[in-house]
Image (cartoon, grey):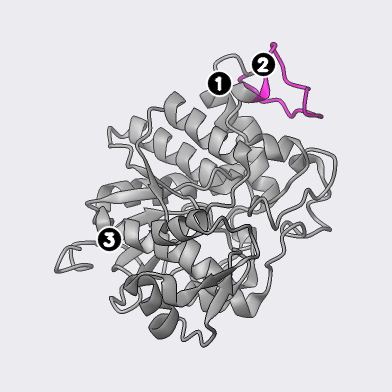
């Protein structure tokens, strides 16, 4: 990591403090701010990357990155995809497909020590992992970072130890390996209480916890409905030449214009199938049978289909580097 970080970066870490999505009332207000933050992120940081999960929020950020890079003659940075070994197959297919379509460099971040242990012992999600059998690096995180006192932990994302080791450690190792100083992510204020106080440029500078870097967060001001509005009126028409320029909102999984199919659209098929949030194959269920954008977004919870939605756990995980 650059020795004098963050001295060479000149950003306002207070930008967005105390704000809510209501302060960006129109979709154009939200997009204008997203463009501003994205451009500053691409210009200020020497080695930025985009956090890409294959979900709607990070894919929208990736769209802004591509558009801003093209408009202002900037480089599109690599995307980091955390492979936690419990993704839906459709997520892998989606990421691989659109990485190829958009000519993206993708870094697949994995905790390979745990992956090897799982494979060698033929484990299924929920089976226990013996901590003493893991690498010193992982044991350090368990003992000294998490201060976890059990001898084993379940091979599941929706636990304190599992989430940290399978996702955060994998991410932090990639940040260190590729010397990433700023990572653009799809965090939103309305998504969880633990994220409500985030700013557009959020420092993560404690070297005892993670490789020092900044989080660049262009879509904090979006809510779930605005994300879908941006997709169907801007991201998809700008990405898919056959899609109507004035936008079109599909009403079902087979309702696309001009003979287009789901494979032609940069929206995960899981959203067409009724999922509103994409966690893992083990812990996420569809919220309804309608496509995500047609569901009751105002009166229902976006993460209702996910097992993990505990604010105290989220707070602790975010303190340790979780997105």
Residue reaching furthest to the left: 3
The residue depicted at 32 percent of the width and 58 percent of the height is 175
Magenta span of residues? 244-262
**Left or right: where does residue 205 sit relative to residue 118?**
left
Q: Secondary structure at mark 3?
A: helix
Q: Position of residue 210 (x, y in %)?
A: 34, 71
Q: Main secondary structure of the magenta part?
A: loop
Q: Is residue 250 magenta?
A: yes
Q: Is residue 50 magenta?
A: no
> Which numbered tag is attached to residue 111?
none
Q: Secondary structure at mark 1?
A: loop
The residue to which callout 3 is attached is: 176
The residue to which callout 2 is attached is: 260
Q: Position of residue 127 (x, y in %)?
A: 63, 65
> Which numbered tag is attached to residue 240?
1
Q: Earlier in the sequence, mark 1 or mark 3?
A: 3
- Crowd tier of the residue under label 2, counting other residues whose Cα lies within 10 Å: few below 14, some 14–19, many 20 or above: some
Residue 181 quadrant = bottom left
Q: Nearer the viewer, mark 2 or mark 1?
A: 2
**Left or right: where does residue 69 sit relative to residue 242?**
left
Q: What is the spatial separation of the Cα atoms under label 2 and label 1, in whole angstroms?
A: 9 Å
Residue reaching furthest to the top: 258
């Amino acid at each position: 990591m650059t020795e004098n970080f963050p001295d060479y970066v000149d950003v306002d870490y207070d930008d967005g403090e105390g704000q809510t999505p209501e302060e960006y009332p129109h979709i154009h207000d939200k997009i204008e701010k997203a463009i501003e933050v994205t451009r500053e992120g691409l210009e200020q940081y020497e080695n930025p990357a985009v956090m890409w999960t294959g979900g709607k929020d990070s894919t929208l950020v990736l769209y802004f990155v591509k558009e801003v890079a093209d408009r202002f003659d900037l480089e599109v940075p690599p995307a980091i995809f955390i492979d936690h070994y419990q993704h839906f197959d459709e997520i892998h297919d989606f990421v691989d497909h659109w990485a190829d379509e958009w000519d993206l460099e993708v870094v697949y971040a994995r905790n390979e020590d745990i992956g090897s242990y799982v494979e060698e012992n033929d484990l299924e999600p929920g089976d226990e992992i013996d901590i003493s059998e893991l690498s010193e690096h992982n044991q350090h995180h368990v003992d000294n970072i998490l201060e976890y006192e059990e001898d084993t932990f379940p091979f599941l994302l929706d636990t304190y130890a599992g989430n940290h080791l399978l996702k955060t450690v994998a991410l932090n190792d990639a940040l260190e390996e590729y010397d990433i100083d700023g990572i653009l992510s799809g965090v939103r204020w309305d998504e969880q209480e633990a994220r409500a106080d985030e700013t557009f440029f959020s420092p993560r500078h404690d070297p005892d916890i993670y490789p020092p870097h900044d989080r660049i967060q262009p879509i904090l001001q979006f809510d779930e409905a605005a994300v879908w509005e941006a997709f169907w009126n801007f991201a998809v028409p700008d990405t898919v030449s056959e899609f109507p320029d004035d936008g079109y909102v599909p009403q079902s999984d087979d309702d696309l214009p001009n003979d287009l199919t789901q494979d032609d659209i940069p929206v995960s098929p899981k959203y067409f199938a009724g999922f509103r949030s994409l966690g893992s194959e083990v812990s996420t269920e569809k919220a309804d049978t309608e496509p995500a954008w047609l569901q009751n977004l105002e009166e229902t919870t976006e993460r209702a289909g996910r097992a993990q939605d505990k604010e105290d756990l989220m707070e602790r995980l975010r303190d340790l580097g979780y997105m």
